[in-house]
Amino acid sequence: MLEETRDRDEIVERVAALDIGKAEVVCCVRVPSPSGSGRRAQEVRTYPTMTRSLIALGQWLAGLGVTRVVMEATSDYWKPPFYLLEAAGFEVWLVNARDVKHLPGRPKTDKLDAVWLCKVAERDMIRPSFVPPAPIRQLRDLTRYRIDLVGDRGRAKNRVEKLLEDAQIKLSVVASDIFGVSGRAMMQALIAGERDPKTLAQLARTRMRTKLPQLEEAFVGRFSEHHAFLLARMLAQIDTVNADITTVEQRIAELVAPFAAAVTRLDEIPGVATTAAHAILAEIGVDMTRFPTAGHLASWAKFAPTVKQSAGKNKGNGATGHGNPYLARTLGEAAVGASKTSTFLGQRYRRIARRRGKKKAVVAIGRSILTIVWHLLHDEQARFIDLGPDHYDTRTSTQHAVRNHIRGLNALGYQVTLQPAA
């Protein structure tokens, strides 16, 4: 049966394409020929990337009646033209450079790249990348900066631990967290000049006081004034980063206030806390019309295996590919958190981990969480209901359970013979 398509020779009548660099942008415009011959008129201009020049570019495009402007995602250089043209009322598309890769064997210049992109765009042979609206972009900047600050704090803490090891202070061997109340008090005493192991050990609080003998042994080292100077600077840096994280989190709370209802719904998902909900909303937004189905969202986030088939045979290993690293990190952490719970997602993780390993189980649970997120954001009336850890047991047939148990015993080297009970 023949299937109709919407393809035409020229779908977008008035289109522009930008080849963006740091200092200048090359713009190619293709519009219907004024002669009415059915041919296409084309013009290429180069503009500096300064704000006034980009405004002039927008005025030129508006004068030609351009409706769609297409540009490649070149580093962060695409942002100024994108934002200015978007504010001017154009339909702006950001496209993946891989989708418009130049044909091999042809010369490559900025002008030719702009012309090629424009020809591809006018035939509607490319798809736009997801660029969230301005409020979500601002929230995304903050959540990503918070992640970077947490990374900076982790690296600073690692430097402190290495410094203590250099001074033969084995505090990290005894204390699980050397930056708790007891650990900070001990390190501050070291900076102040205290070197007596017993005096330092007595600074322990609560449960740490059960380890006084081990603490006294841990502080027998060669901590010098040199170490004290460096430790003071490192602890000051950690305190500064902590203060920055607190300030950023307060700003995030202000920007996410209009989406408080969505955050509350996402917070009900096992493994997804408030911070993770903020990060998820910052990466995918709250408007799910951009993703027609949950499968589209999972595919965009690269939480779905790719399909490679040739000559009727499947190729490759079914890898998902590399998607949004910030979203992948958040979903991975949420999946690990959900795996430790007595919920449906926790039981699903354990079932998959037994058969296919922990890494694939994390990806599978991450996709399940993303599917739940799509449904909760797609329908404001939807609420998360946990199916329970016994969902599989109550839904699985007896024969299916027997077959799984036999397969598991065979994998352990046993030969199973079934005999019905009397």
Image (tube, rainbow, N blue to C red):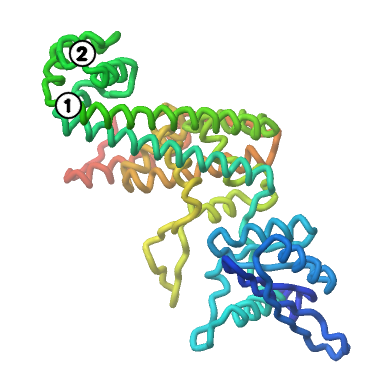
Quadrant for the C terminus, please.
Answer: top left
Q: Is residue 387 visible?
A: no
Quarter of the rendering containing residue 32: bottom right
Q: Position of residue 327 (x, y in %)?
A: 50, 46
Quadrant for the N terminus, please.
Answer: bottom right
Is label 2 or label 1 in front? Answer: 1
Mark 1 closeness class: few <14, some 14–19, many ≥20 residues within 10 Å: few
- How far separated are the C-alphas under marks 2 and 1? 15 Å
Q: Position of residue 173 (x, y in %)?
A: 18, 25
Q: Is residue 33 visible?
A: yes
In this view, the residue in front, 364 or 281, is 281
In this view, the residue in front, 325 or 27, is 27
When the figure is inspected, residue 409 is found, relative to residue 9, above or below; the finding is: above
Amino acid type at mark 2: Leu
Circle 1: element type: loop
Q: Name the residue: 28% across, 36% down.
A: 159
Q: Which residue is mark 1?
A: 224
Number of on-image labels: 2
In this view, the residue in front, 155 or 349, is 155
Amino acid type at mark 1: Ser
Quarter of the rendering containing residue 194: top left
Q: Which residue is mark 2?
A: 200
